[in-house]
Image (spheres, grey):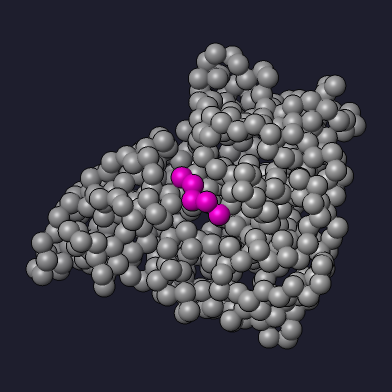
Amino acid sequence: MKRLLLQLAAISSLLLLMAAAGRGSSRPRYGGTVRVLLHDKVTTIDPLNEEDHPASRDRLAALSFETLTEVDALGHVHPKLASSWHSDQAKRVWQFRLRLANFHNGTLLTASDVVASLGKSNSGWKYTVNDRQTLTIETPFAITHMPELLALPKYAIVKRLPDSNAGTGPYRLTEWQAGERALFAVNEDYWGGRAYPDAIEFQMGASLRDQLLERQLGKHAAAEVSIDQLRTLEQANQNIVLSRPADLMVVLFLQPDSVGKPGRKPVDARVREALANTINRTAISNGLLQRRGVPASGLLPQWLTGYEFMFPGNSNLDRARELRADAAAFVVITPIALAYDLSDPLAKLVAERIAVDASAAGIAVQPYGELHINSKTARASLNADAVLLRLPLQSVEPSVALSAVADDLGFSDSAPTIFVPAILGATRQEDLFEVERKTLAGYRVIPVAHLPQALWLSGSIHNWQQLMTGAWQLDQLWIEGAR
């Protein structure tokens, strides 16, 4: 039933995209430059480098660096750089056959290149080069959905050279100003056939609101949109495309109960649970998120798993006050320092609303903005008790999606030999539900909302595909009137 609902949702999304992006009866044509406004400032396109805005990094990286497999809008896995694969019965040994493809520097993609790249993505696997075009991956535990896992951006194949990185994708990076501008030129020798546009240019750190005020959107094909901007754009009859509510907004407490950061004690588990009971998720979703987000009680959205409704998510101030009073009898309750992404106005509003809700139960939350909170390295240096994160959904295969969320939260690092196998080896929805239940039980992570990713599209752009996860597929993109 879950798979059927997922397919129906995907078909609905595709029909909307076709209606939005397939205007006119013109046939696809080659040429032109697609100009895109990105809200975030991206400092690297290497999929393995830590980045404050990983979702934006992955959008850029996907133009140059490809994975062995890909997952379509219906959740079906397809060949990419791997033309075929098979596994043993235990799902621990996987063999992949590569298609003929060249890197941007003209060298042939080989199994040795793939092994060298994957070895940096996951050093816990054993890799064997069988021949020039065939490799074997052996894992220490069963991975039920290995092809779907290898479609994640972190497993993109990159040939790391002393002066640059080479990929096999439909575009190659030709100009780069970190945090400001990126220009990708078409790869004329792409194995999948030449893409339609000659180039794709990204302007980073751009304010869509400023662009609208200055009437400068005419030359642009697409722009990222914040939820707080949707109403204005829709009232102006602008073309907006929304993904499913896929991103997870979550409060993550940084200090584990066992070992706290020197000079900062972990927040008592009863206080964390009390805070979870104060958050009015419905008010946040209906008000601040303009009914475009949905309340979150689990790590994965209901439309993906079908079981999120089984996690408690309603506010309960009476229970929150009881828990706070119980904790106060044993520990000194200090204000909770909650860091949010300073570059995200929506995160500021949500953090401030969480603080207001918490005060009703006598819990002091002090929100403040930080520029660097999304990478695990940056969070380790924060002088905060908790952070408000927005995590992208990286797959429509639930086990792969949950493993990616666990990795983003840093939970996989604390118990990799137990936590990761339980997720990736799961064969039933009940197994994933149990992992989520145990993860949420200690209230170190508190789900707040699931949000869509929004995109403004020009009337001249065709076949821009935004998937349910919010990821972009631009392989069939073309521009009306291109010369």
Vertical arrangement, residue 89 with respect to residue 412, above or below: below
Vertical arrangement, residue 185 with respect to residue 413, above or below: above
Direction from residue 222 to residue 56 in the image, left or right: left
Vertical arrangement, residue 206 with respect to residue 449, above or below: above
* Residue located 47% across and 74% down the image: 416
Residue 227, image x, y percentages: 50, 36
Magenta stretch, residue numbers: 48-52
Q: In which quadrant will I find the C terminus?
A: top right
Q: Quadrant of residue 312?
A: bottom left
Q: Quadrant of residue 153?
A: bottom right
* Residue located 37% across and 61% down the image: 445
Q: Is residue 50 one of those drawn in magenta?
A: yes
- Residue closest to the far top: 214
Residue 453, image x, y percentages: 57, 43
- Residue closest to the far bottom: 89
* Residue located 37% across and 40% down the image: 371
Residue 407, image x, y percentages: 48, 63
Vertical arrangement, residue 353 with respect to residue 35, above or below: below
Give the prevailing secondary structure in the magenta stretch: loop
Direction from residue 85 to residue 321 in the image, left or right: left
Q: Is residue 333 visible?
A: yes
Q: Is residue 11 one of those drawn in magenta?
A: no
Q: Is residue 357 visible?
A: no
Depth check: give the residue in front, 305 or 467. Answer: 467
Residue 262, image x, y percentages: 20, 61
